[in-house]
Amino acid sequence: MQLLTGKPCPLSKPSISCDNYPVRLRYLIIGATGGVSASALVGLGLFWHLKNSQPTNPPDVSTHSLTSETSPLKTATDRKPSSNFEYPLICSDPYKAICLRTTSHRDPTGSVHSDVEGEVQALRIVEEIIHEHPEWTSEQVDEELAQIIYTPKRVGRIQSAFRFVRATIEKTIRAQPTEVFSKKDKRLLVNRINSVQLELPPPAALYSDQPDLFTKNDVFYQQSTNGSRKLRVGGAFVMSIKSWFNLVFTLAHELGHSIDPCELRGIPPEKDSAPAAYKNLTSCFLKQGLVSHHKNRSECGENDQLSETFADWIAVQITAIALKEYATEFHKPLIQAAAMNSVRDLCEQDDTLNDLDSEFHPSPKVRIEKIFGNSPEIRNVLGCPSLEGSLKYCTLNPETPERPKDPMELKK
Amino acid sequence: MKFLMPFIILIALTLIESGCASSKPKLDTSKQTPEEGDSNIEITYVLGHNRYKFCAAATESMAAGQTFIEREKLQDSKIDLAKYTAFLKRVSEFSALPQRTPAAFCRSPFTIAVRIGKRKEVLSGCRTGNEAELSKIIQEGEFLLYSKK
């Protein structure tokens, strides 16, 4: 205002005369315009970032039938893919897209670190505790370790994911037609799922019979000799897995073991309590090479991958539901990152010296490409095209095997 | 003593390498008791989808240990000799216990190899059925790696 009144500019430099009112005013207007524009851009950018990165609470469970057609994509674009349109690598080569990238993926809920990283972190904490308290007993060290690793926030997150997984598996079981699961089958499966306890320290005494778990990167389903079923989570896993989708896949895999075909064998009073639909599923797994035909394979015995394949298959269904729920909130690249993170840790098992692991688990390539990547639900949520040829994804219902649907066709 | 230290370190490292490679011990002593002489311990086990290995070795004056997950070394350090001796005794006693093997096949096998002087014992078993004791031994071994600052 001083400029407009003609009064001398108290802070003007000698080279700038207060006679140059129009010039000064132009500079003022330009500067003000620039400042407002910059603020607007920053504001827009912040709004966009917040919209895409803010994690939401775990989604509500939706009903989902493993034999029905999938619902239309909520994030599918309206445009038809042009002839030059290229689907992302995860559609054509999921193993390469997920495992052969050197950089880690970050989805809105976090990322996945290597097994080694988590275990080294856990051992560093052990080292600090022992050096600070050399006189402590191993029980005291365990208690301190449990307090440091299993924080209320981390434990709450795992518990929340577990509740989601358990509720989703239950709903999925109940949604099956009676031709797939009878009422008796549903009752058995739901009871088994709901009887699994998630055991998380503190107190450290919960793992007193397996204290080395505190520094291990794994999640374990166990059935004790007294019949109790529980899920335990290694301390290194708690520290290395940040992505909620990986948590969902891992917990769903382990919880899936409580109802896998081998686990259900020998349950009284029947010799084999597994639903009849499991036979169809097992047969499909064998036909498609999801369960290897080892020379001396004994079903549910030595050299058999049926348990692990089934657990992976269940985990894929549940993860697809989780991804579908978040598809309304995330843009496509973020959903792809979330999907990749959900199975990212399976890649490391390709490097293992452990022959025993390959005896009971399908190879990472089979798990990621065939069980995960060929799933119609996963392909739909990622916007991938349907698979060509006669490849049919394994389902419980042998009469209407689920053929992956083209997401573009669903919009018609 | 200071002059001899590099040689002692070299000997201890040689013992560890020979133990972890599961080859015949390079040093030959006639000492038989757990409290004296050269010794090494190697424990390999499967947990989840990973294979782990813990190695420790000692001469009369020092001890060292390492732990691995698959090909990766997680930790490598000197060990308090008195604590190593107690650990060696515990592992030897565990190896002598009757092992409980589950009726079904084993998905989490373990092997413990203990060498004391010329004497070597190897025990293979299943983690399921021997869970508690083996898990505590493994944890004690991990803690041992931090027993010396």
Image (tube, rainbow, N blue to C red):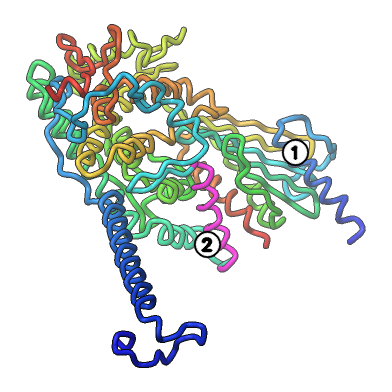
Of all residues shown, which one is farthest toward the right?
Answer: B3
Foreground pick, A22 / A372: A22
Type of amino acid at the residue the image marks with label 2: Thr
Left or right: where does residue A300 sit relative to residue A14?
Answer: left
**Is residue A200 at all visible to an observer of this figure?**
yes
Report the mark closest to the observer, 1 or 2: 1
Q: Which corner quadrant holds the C terminus of chain A?
A: top left
Q: Residues within 10 Å of mark 1 (few under 14, many from 20)?
A: some
Against A378, residue B137 (above or below) is below
Residue A221 appears in the rendering = no
Q: Does A127 lie within the magenta span?
A: yes
Q: Residue at x 83, y 47 (%)?
A: B10
Residue tagged 1: B17
Residue at 60% across, 31% down? B123
Q: Main secondary structure of the magenta part?
A: helix
Span colored in magenta: A114-132
Q: Which mark is residue A137?
A: 2
Q: Position of residue A192 (x, y in %)?
A: 20, 33
Count of numbered badges drawn on the protein: 2
Residue B33, percent across and down?
Answer: 75, 45
Identify residue type, mark 1.
Answer: Glu
In what quadrant of the picture does the N terminus of chain A appear? Answer: bottom left
Asked if residue A203 lies left or right of residue A329, the reply is: right
Residue A352 falls in image quadrant: top right
Q: Nearer the viewer, residue B79 or A78?
A: A78
Position of A77 relative to A39 (above/below): above
Q: Is residue A412 magenta?
A: no
Q: What percent of the width, then of the height, locates residue A387?
A: 29, 15
Q: Chain of mark 2?
A: A
C-alpha span from label 1 to label 2: 30 Å
Tag 1 secondary structure = helix
